[in-house]
Image (cartoon, grey):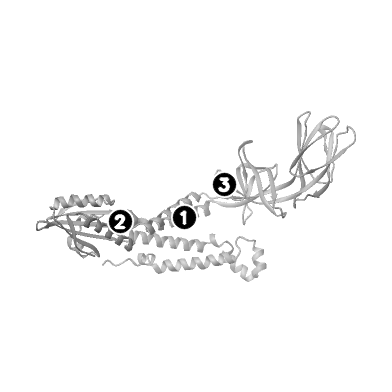
Amino acid sequence: MKKKNPIQAFFASVKLTLFVLFMLAILSIIGTVVPQNKPAEFYVEVYGANMAGLFQTLDVPDMYSSWWFTGLLILLSLNMVVCILERFPNAWRLITMDNLQMKLQKLERMGRRGLFSSNMSVSKTTEVLKDIFARNGWKFQQKSQDDGTLLFSQKGTWSRLGVYAFHASILIIFVGAMIGSFWGYKAGVRIPETTSTDTVYEFGTNKPIKLDFEVKCKRFKLTYYETGMPKEFRSELAIIENGKEVLAKSIVVNDPLSYKGLTFYQSSYEAYQKLLVTLKNNETGVGKEFLIPPGEEIPWAEEKVSFGVINKQMTATPGHFRYKIWFNDNNGEAGNFWMEEDSTSTFQRPQATYTITLKEFFATGLQVTKDPGVWCVYFGCILMILSLIVAFFFSHRRIWLYVSESGQGSRILMSGSANKNKVGFDKTFAALTESIQENEYMEAVSGQ
């Protein structure tokens, strides 16, 4: 037996696999217990100066991107690669081998075998057997051997590759994660309604990242439960390139907007002590949007009117308010009326009819993710699921039939093997044995 290279033996060791998995599990626990990517002052306050310094040295605050955590993943990857390279050739040999070269002595020693007799000739018996097995989904190859005929059929040949596909899927996921780690980022941005930005800020470092397009928050809407707790926050976003809107989408939590490899998730919001008011003169068709603080008189010089919000009351719905609007267009006495937020009201003045829309002013908080390796990860996950299905639910099953002359008829030796699910194969073998016995020209001599 050829002696293994020591380096190869080290990387192919099961002990190495167990050690790396154990270390990754321990470090993942630490990374879960110790909050990640917090400011340095947080660790000093919570753990003390000495421990915080040790954490910074060991990259504990950014554990999953640390050199030693990455090193363990690389070591595990090398371990799997060497194991695959070492064991794959034997699996490939079993897949591609010529099973019609099997020696009769090996067939007679197999754990699953049966012996039958037939009162037909070898050629006639061979054709009948092929027909019986074809009805059960087994297609045979045949070859003359040792004054008889050897038949062979197999199912699930490629299932032997399931375990290697599973290990390959893990490596593909690792590669995708590395691509995302080195060439991707996670950032955040806060955009007030009606405004846009072309800059986001990386988490942890707060480094500004310039985009080659603008993101605009056209509207933000907050809805509440009957208890007054926030139920849903929704942002109407638009992508603007070269001054033109090229994409628009309404996003909520878990329903993001994706554009040019970036994904914008709804993550938070901020309420301002201001109101967003749209006022329109229905006679002239002129309208304008205003951002106003309550309690101040707001002039609209072009229309020679002024207005303001002079009172605020909560409605019967918790978290929902109504506002008292004061309005003056210098035609008759100034008027006032109540209207609820997120509503539209039309009112008549001596010289014109006006429509006003009012809502609370918000800024939307977005999480921005760039992950160029995400499709690699998706592919790895799909491959992992398929390989697990193959590995657990399929097996390589092989059947040999050797038909030889015996007196006035023929002798039939049936042998079989399976690399997994031996119980299931036993049932299949027994069913095939029964199918042979049901033929009027054949009978069982012995079976196992």
Label 2 or label 1, whichever comes before in sequence order: 2
SS state under label 3: strand
The label number, if any, that marks residue 173 in the structure image: 1
Label 3 or label 1, whichever comes before in sequence order: 1
**Can you name the residue that lies furthest to the right here?**
333
Determine whether label 2 and label 1 are within 8 Å by CB.
no
Residue behind mark 3: 262
Pick the residue in front: 237 or 385: 385
Quadrant of the snapshot with the N terminus: bottom left
For the point 50% across and 55% down, the residue is 177
For the point 22% across and 57% down, the residue is 437
Residue behind mark 2: 92
The label number, if any, that marks residue 186 in the structure image: none
Residue 441 is situated, as x and y percent measured from the top left of the image, at 17, 54
On the rendered structure, is 97 left or right of 193? left
Residue 333 is situated, as x and y percent measured from the top left of the image, at 90, 36
Pick the residue in front: 125 or 239: 125
Can residue 182 be seen from the camera position used here? Answer: yes
Q: CA distance from mark 2 to mark 3?
A: 42 Å
Pick the residue in front: 161 or 34: 161
Residue 38 is situated, as x and y percent measured from the top left of the image, at 63, 61
SS state under label 1: helix
Q: CA distance from mark 3 to mark 1?
A: 20 Å
